[in-house]
Amino acid sequence: MALFRKKTKYFKYSYERTKAYFEQHREIEARNFLKCPKWAKPEYDENGRYAEEPDGLLPLFDPRRQQRFYREGQMAAGTIVQANELLFARGKGDSPATFIYTQDPFFLQNPEELICLAHELFSTKGDDGFIPSIQYVADLLADEAGRYFHYHLPSNVLENRDVWLTTILVSRDHLPDNTLKPEIVYPMLILPDDGPDAMILPYWYWQK
């Protein structure tokens, strides 16, 4: 998995205008629903039970949960920590990615600081010798097949600012140009749950 490639031009949006627009248009359309990728679909044994532990993202594709994102979800700002390299190029497959997100006014007003934080977190991946709270994050990132949701980053190293680490599904259909772009702070929808808790707000809600 990779963090960022070169900087690219991308669709610019206003977080506040996007938030206001979304609040006025919470009705869910058919194109809003995330499609379950083949790799996330569980296999069953002859007794109709899971043949193996299902992917941690599987609950995300429950239509009832997706409806909750639009009915109850809150807006946040999020950015990439690490993602499958295939997502940075045109293609057809959707893949998971690790994001951080926040509603803290400091990061909303200084989005470059959130991107810097993502860089710093990625730099810990696979390394050791950190304080326990950061070592835990480094170990999470080293497990690229792992799924983790709604993990509150240690506030003692963030000046008591609230930032969460999570696994999301990157849906190409929800992105301009169907690709994930570097150095972007994305508008996101979040649920305060222990399961899949975040998704990128589809681009047709983004307002300049």
Image (tube, rainbow, N blue to C red):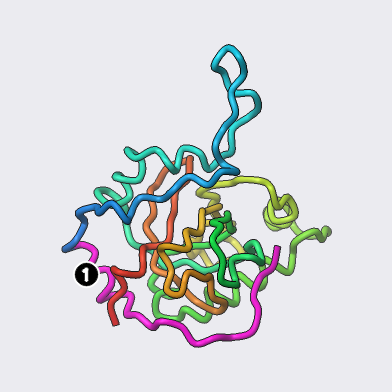
- Between residue 112 and residue 154, name the one nearer to us: 112
Q: What is the x, y in percent for residue 180?
A: 53, 70
Outermost residue on the front side: it is 92
Picture coordinates of residue 174, whole percent (x, y): 40, 63
Quarter of the image that includes the N terminus: bottom right
Residue located farthest toward the top when viewing the structure as drawn: 47
The percent position of residue 172, horizontal first and vertical second, equals 48, 63
Q: In the figure, 37 relative to 113: above or below?
A: above
Residue at left offset 25%, top offset 76%: 17
Q: Residue at x 46, y 74 (%)?
A: 177
Q: Seen in the image, is 167 located left or right of residue 139? A: left
Q: Residue 137's quadrant in the figure?
A: bottom right
- The magenta segment: 1-23
Q: Is residue 38 above or below residue 157?
A: above
Q: Is residue 68 above or below residue 89?
A: above
> What residue lies at 32% left-to-right and 56% top-to-bottom?
31
Instruction: Give the dominant element type of the magenta stretch: helix, strand or loop.
Output: loop
Residue 11 colored magenta?
yes
In this view, 27 is above or below 54: below
> Is 13 colored magenta in this rendering?
yes
Which residue in the protein does label 1 denote?
20
Q: x, y percentage for residue 199?
A: 43, 56
Q: Secondary structure at mark 1?
A: helix
Q: Residue at x 38, y 63 (%)?
A: 76
| Three-letter code for the amino acid on which mark 1 is drawn | Ala
